[in-house]
Image (tube, rainbow, N blue to C red):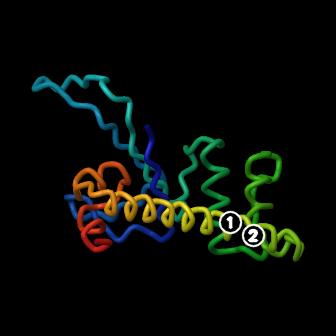
Amino acid sequence: MYVIVVITSPYRISDKSGQPVKDEVLLVKLNPKTLAGEERELYGHQLVFLNPNYRDNSTPTSIRDWLDLIYESIHNSEESVINQENAGIRRAAELIARENMTPEERALSKNKEAGKVTIAKEKQATVVEIAQNAIRAGLDNTLIATLTGLSIADVQQLR
């Protein structure tokens, strides 16, 4: 598992010596170490901090392209300078460029989001209806909460 944190403004932190932290990419491995300092690869999890505000020439191109896209979309959205040769970057830039969307595409996008909200509301209404039926059937709050995923407080409020 990777957790990627994108920091969109310069770090305002310093290391223990008081020096400002100006790293473009910071990696934290989440594996335990022995008392001798030997790392045990148990999880393979990693926390990745990306800050495109501090350019480092040693950053690999595969990461650099994404950092440039982030930086340019924030600081230079009108005339972004990004690697259009990278198909993923090109596609991401197209997706975030609202001016490239037709009114029909915008409407379709809004309709999809509205549909998701409607489905969620319908699902919640169904859960409430099931809980109300269970209350009428005389089931206890704990069982109703278990069956529906509602909290016991929600079940009590329905009563």
- CA gap, disc 2 to disc 1? 6 Å
Extreme-front residue of the structure: 137
| Residue placed most toward the observer, 71 or 130 | 130
Instruction: Provide the residue designation for mark 1.
Output: 115
Disc 1, SS? helix
Q: Mark 2: which secondary structure?
A: helix
- Disc marking residue 111: 2
Please tell me which residue is depicted at 80% across the width and 73% down the height of the picture.
106
Extreme-left residue of the structure: 35
Residue 60 disc label: none
Residue ID at (31%, 23%): 41
Report whether 102 appears left or right of 44: right
Instruction: Name the residue: 88% across, 72% down.
Output: 104
Please tell me how crowded label 1 is: few (under 14), some (14-19), or many (20+) other residues with Cα within 10 Å: few
Q: Amino acid at mark 1?
A: Gly
| Count of number-bearing discs | 2
Residue 28 image position (x, y, % from top left) = 34, 43
Where residue 137 sits: x, y (%)? Answer: 33, 57
Q: Are marks 2 and 1 in contact (CB under 8 Å)?
A: yes
Location of the C terminus (image quadrant): bottom left
Between 65 and 20, the one lying in front of the other is: 65
Looking at the picture, which amino acid does disc 2 mark? Asn
